[in-house]
Amino acid sequence: MIKVYCYAKCTTCKKALKWLDDNKISYEEIDIKGNHPDEKTIRELHKKSGLPLKRFFNTSGQLYREMELSKKLPEMSEDEMYKILSSDGMLVKRPLLITDKTVIPGFKEETWKEATK
């Protein structure tokens, strides 16, 4: 079963969910703000993705900017990054697509098409 962490007010999330619906792909939607992934889950998703951990940060988010994470991340250990990512769902890049095979932060139609076939 495909899972998608989303934020209801996010236009990119709405676009991604519409794409899934239009392509008749069933999924479970999870509210990233109210039910954000815990540290253990973030660690598992990161490992499954094969991507750099920094790709999981919502770099355009207000909270990311307020915390000045662009300045702090280069000095942080992975353990510190996991703790921060799991502290608030608004710090996690969304939508976050989770399939049996992979995890993809953000929405790019071609990438999602490949991941959901």
Image: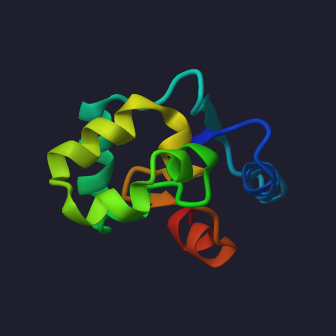
Q: Considering depth in this image, is 63 or 111 the residue closer to the camera?
A: 63
| Left or right of 38 on screen, residue 44 | left
> Is residue 51 shown left or right of residue 114?
left
- The x and y percentages for residue 18 are 82, 52
* Quarter occupied by residue 72: bottom left
Q: Is residue 116 left or right of residue 71?
A: right
Asked whether residue 53 appears in the rendered view, the answer is no
Q: Position of residue 83 (x, y in %)?
A: 27, 36
Q: Residue furthest bottom?
A: 110
Query: Is residue 38 shown to the viewer in this render?
Result: yes
64 and 11: which one is in front?
A: 64
Q: How is the protein colored in the picture? A: rainbow
Residue at the spot x=41%, y=64% of the render?
55
Determine whether 53 is above or below 29 in the image: below
Residue 30, horizontal then vertical, whole percent = 59, 31
Residue drawn where x is 68% and y is 72% of the image:
109
> Which residue is located at x 32 percent, y 68 percent?
51
Q: Residue drawn at (77%, 52%), measured in percent from left and top?
A: 24
**The C terminus, quarter of image:** bottom right
Please indicate whether residue 37 sits to the left or right of residue 72 in the image.
right
Total label count?
0
The residue at the far top in this view is: 34
Q: Is residue 107 above or below residue 95?
A: below
